[in-house]
Image (spheres, helix red, strand yellow):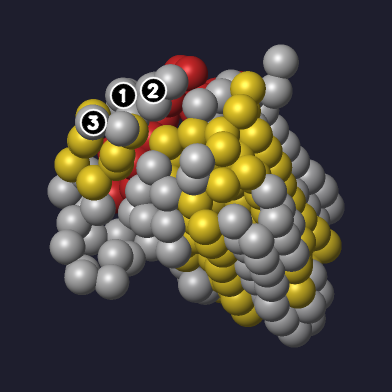
Amino acid sequence: MWHIEDMYDLSHSAAGEYLQQFTYPWEALAGISDLILSLGATLSEAEYDHPAPDVWIAKDATVFPSAYIHGPCIIGHGTEVRQCAFIRGSALVGDNCVVGNSTELKNVILFDNVQVPHYNYVGDSILGYKAHMGAGSITSNVKSDKLPVVIKNGDEHIPTGRKKVGAMLGDRVEVGCNSVLNPGTVIGRDSNVYPTSCVRGVIPAAHIYKDQQHIVAKY
């Protein structure tokens, strides 16, 4: 359930072919910037504006004047980037997404139809198709001791070799308001996180996270 093929429908992202070369999603984080630059060079001028170096924005996307977008970045078709959004770079944002007011993105892949609509921080993370983060929920991407992040699932540990790893959210994951996803959190497809949760480790697909001791199957 940690594998890319178990978490994501790759047909719903321009990064699909890129992601196929990896086993685990966090392995893809190092190459997001280069991926965007490569994809950007292939985009049609009839469909995408190129308002700044290494920034491509679909002509049918809506970007509010107060939003800040730094390259490399691609904003997909029908996506809305709302007031005071802060895109720091290395952000591949899919089609029909919502990047909300005061939301900050850095080194991320957002699949199509992802919503990070209100006061979210998403860094060094991959959010699957139709994933949604409630207001104020964030990904914490650096441990307090600054050591490399290790993905933990019970007694099974996988070193990432990276100091910065946020959250890997599978397709259709719902994260409740004001939740914190600790470094190296992995949440399987169709799972839900209760509001105000502090999540770490691996949450299986189709489960509800109530707290660390109460993670229950949905069906």
Residue type indicated by callout 3: Asp
Badge 3: residue crowd in 10 Å (few <14, some 14–19, many ≥20): few
**Foreground disc of the pair 3, 1:** 3
Residue at 70% x, 56% y: name it: 195
Q: How far is the residue under mark 2 from the one under mark 3?
A: 18 Å
Residue type indicated by callout 1: Thr
Q: Are marks 1 and 2 in contact (CB under 8 Å)?
A: yes
Q: Secondary structure at mark 2?
A: loop
> Label 1: which residue?
23
> Label 2: which residue?
3
Q: Quadrant of the N terminus?
A: top left
| 151 left or right, relative to 215 | left
Q: Which sits in the foreground, 114 or 211?
A: 211
Picture disc at residue 155: 3
Q: Position of residue 67 (x, y in %)?
A: 70, 78
Residue at 33% x, 33% y: name it: 153
Above or below residue 202? Residue 178 is below
Q: Secondary structure at mark 3?
A: loop
Picture disc at residue 104: none
